[in-house]
Amino acid sequence: MRRAWALTALLTLSGCTVAGTRAQAGVEQVVVGYQSKTINTVTAGTLLRAQGFLEKRLGDGYQVVWQDYDTGAPITAQMMAGKIDIGSMGDYPLLINGARGQQSEQTRTKMIAVTGYNRRGALNTVVVARDSPVGTLSGLRGKVVSTSVGSAAHGLLVQALRREGLTDTDVKVENQQPQVGASALQSGNVDALSQFVAWPGLLVHRGEAKVLYDGGALGVPTLHGTVVRQQYADRRPEVVKAFLAAQQDATEYLWRHPLEAAEIVAEQTGLPAEVVYLYNGANGIATFDLAIRPEFRDALARDVPFLASIGVLQGIDLDAFVDDSLVPAGGATPGAVLGGTDAICGTAVRDPALAGELWLAGETATIATTDPTCLLKAVKAARAAGKHIRAVYAPDATTGTRWFADRSTWVRDGDRFLPFVTEAAATAYRTGHPGARVLSYDRAVNEA
């Protein structure tokens, strides 16, 4: 009961938190809207704010006002009213932002950078209660699913259901904010939850849910980005350039210090650091880079018909909305990547589709492993040494989606051990590989 209450308390923190709204004499305010718990926007929000990178770039004469929201919709509403200058949000809300802005010359907005992204769509996930009998998407027929209508998580749900041969009406969709849907899943009022980072990872980490569908199986890029009011950008281009330079500062900090960045974001948001690091850490589900690549433009274009079909978007001029002309040039290679030598197996850690990671309590660095089998051996050695393990991460053998190894389903195929985010994926692999068998995480560790 205490754990459930604690999670409910965390998830029901909602609404807008505003810091420093009273203008100081002789300074100009810059109002930034962000979503602290949508942790793939941290380089334009939580981490950026915590490290003071924007204030350092702006210098004297400016006061930054930070406004924290649960979703992108209220940020868009405030931008349309001229009350937020710069914001960050996911791809679907970005498109809605741009479309609404293009209804008037006074409200136009521009997407000027990307924050975090996943090329396969793994930032969105469908989960069910841990003891749910539903094991596949087709098992949701006639069930109730919570999602935020108009979000990328909603798009994932619809597209995934269609691939399974279900129609949009085969499930009942409850339009709920993420924290409301999480509580509804806990209480049994809904059968599944389709949401964006970090809600699925949080619920799974706490033992309240299991993954039904890995968004990485969809193979469609999903991203978050930075948006600015065009009138503000025209009036204060130096501020917009300073913001993007500060966002680059935050991005490079995350690249170079992924573990420390996760701890900072955890402290600021109340999310477990282990969950933040799952998404934002080395080889994390999210990659951070400001560039608006052609594949992202294409993904946004493919998202438009879906948003139009559910009545939240009439149309948008993407060429007028997407503008990467101010993105800073140069910078390090995108992303924090696991490397070095595997101390257990004595091999080089190179392939992100295989590399695992072990985070021990009290350590300032994690242990990288070459592949899932070496990871299990490292866990076994840590247990034998009496070490307390904070988290273990492994990439899904099919999609490459990094997940909690102890919450994954494992398959042994000869001398190889393979982790899968979903039970359905593990079953599918076993069906195609005679002799392979599904086993629990602890059994896999013991057999490694």
Image: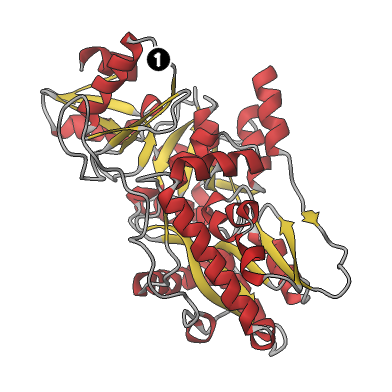
> By what rule are the colours in the image chosen?
secondary structure
Residue 212: x and y, percent?
Answer: 42, 37
Using the rendered image of the protein, determine whether residue 143 is visible from the camera's viewpoint: no
Q: Which quarter of the picture shows residue 307?
A: bottom right
Q: Is residue 329 above or below residue 439?
A: below
Q: Position of residue 174 (x, y in %)?
A: 63, 47
Residue 80: quadrant of the picture:
bottom right
- Count of labels in the image: 1
Residue 419 spot, x, y in % from top left:
28, 31
Which one is in front, 80 or 311? Answer: 80
User: Closest to the observer: 446 or 47?
Assistant: 47
Kind of element beneath mark 1: loop
- In depth, the one of 134 and 196 nearer the eye is 196
| Neighbourhood count class around disc 1 (C-alpha, 10 Å): few under 14, some 14–19, many 20 upward | few
Instruction: Work out which quarter of the rendered image holds the C terminus and state it.
Output: top left
List the residue tagged with mark 1: 387
- From the viewer's perspective, tell me whether residue 313 is left or right of residue 434: right
Please give the name of the residue rendered at 57% of the width and 33% of the height, measured from the top-left corner. Answer: 272
Q: Is residue 341 left or right of residue 205?
A: left
Position of the N terminus by quadrant: top right
Mark 1 belongs to which amino acid?
Lys
Instruction: Please state the horizontal and vertical placement of residue 276, each as a whole percent of the image.
Output: 51, 41
Q: Residue furthest front?
A: 60
Residue at coordinates 41% horizontally, 50% vertically from top-left? 256
Residue drawn at x 40%, y 15% as measured from the top left: 387
Which quarter of the picture shows residue 237? bottom right
63, above or below 167, in the image: below
